[in-house]
Amino acid sequence: MSTEVYLVRHGETMFNQLNKVQGWCDSPPTVKGINDLKVTANALSQVHFDNMYSSDLKRAIDTVHLMKDANLVSDIGKIKKLPEFREVFFGTFEGDDINQTWDQVAMAAGIGHEDNVAKIINQVGLREFREATKRADPRHLAEDKDELDKRMVRAIDVLKDMTKNEQRVLLVTHGDFIKTLSIKYWNKSDGKHDIIFPDNGSVTRGILHDNGKFEIVDYNVNAEKL
């Protein structure tokens, strides 16, 4: 039995609003974030889910409970938290200004000053972007492409095991993780260059097929348009 997976990005947080790097670190949701999520939750309130899951970071947990409470046609028990679906880890850059961080990454990639992440990725490729992030990190803790690829594969394997008897599930995770997962598993991506960053509260839909294959079929969709 194949499983339809609704990947929902958490709502806007204070670090999102303040333009700070937010990977494994957390910050509280903003009023705008909560209000935007209510729109998503209402749009999905009549969609039946066999189960709901989330990353183990608080901003994702807060989001999935809002989805659960608003849903009128699903009987969801205790939410299972999956650390494999955490956001990308940015090491020492966690909590720093985003533009300053990308400028340091661009310098480490050898392309000079640039703070537009899409331009950096599209110029050097996703692998070198992740490698440059690790090199630029003073403690070299940030996830590189191989580390992140392994975690994404493990995340999909974990989800396959958890959803064997489930036809449709909702999973709240994070923007860069959703984007990188989609670069890997969406046929509209070449696997090397950047794609648009998913909006807070947006839905990216994936299919876990019977043969074990995972694919992204809809990316960064406003829930009201599903």
Image (tube, grey):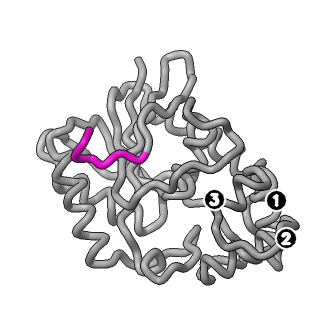
Residue range highlighted in magenta: 220-226
Q: Residue at coordinates 49% horizontally, 21% vertically from top-left?
A: 209
Disc 3 on helix, strand or loop?
Answer: helix
Count neighbours of disc 3 (C-alpha within 10 A) and say few if under 14, some if 14 to 19, many if 20 or more: some
Front tag of 2 and 3? 3
Count neighbours of disc 2 (C-alpha within 10 A) and say few if under 14, some if 14 to 19, many if 20 or more: many
Q: Does the magenta segment cover residue 223?
A: yes
**Residue topped by disc 2:** 108
Above-or-below relation of 211 to 135: above
Q: Residue at coordinates 65% horizontally, 64% vertically from top-left?
A: 117
**Residue topped by disc 1:** 131
Which image quadrant for residue 157? top right
User: Which residue type carries mark 3?
Assistant: Ala
**Residue topped by disc 3:** 118
Q: Marks 1 and 3, Cα distance to the nearest angstrom?
A: 15 Å
Residue 47: where, in percent of width, then height?
20, 38
User: Which residue type carries mark 2?
Assistant: Ala
Residue 122: where, in percent of width, then height?
70, 52
Tell me whether the residue at label 1 lies in contact with that at label 2, contact meaning CB atoms closer than 8 angstroms: no
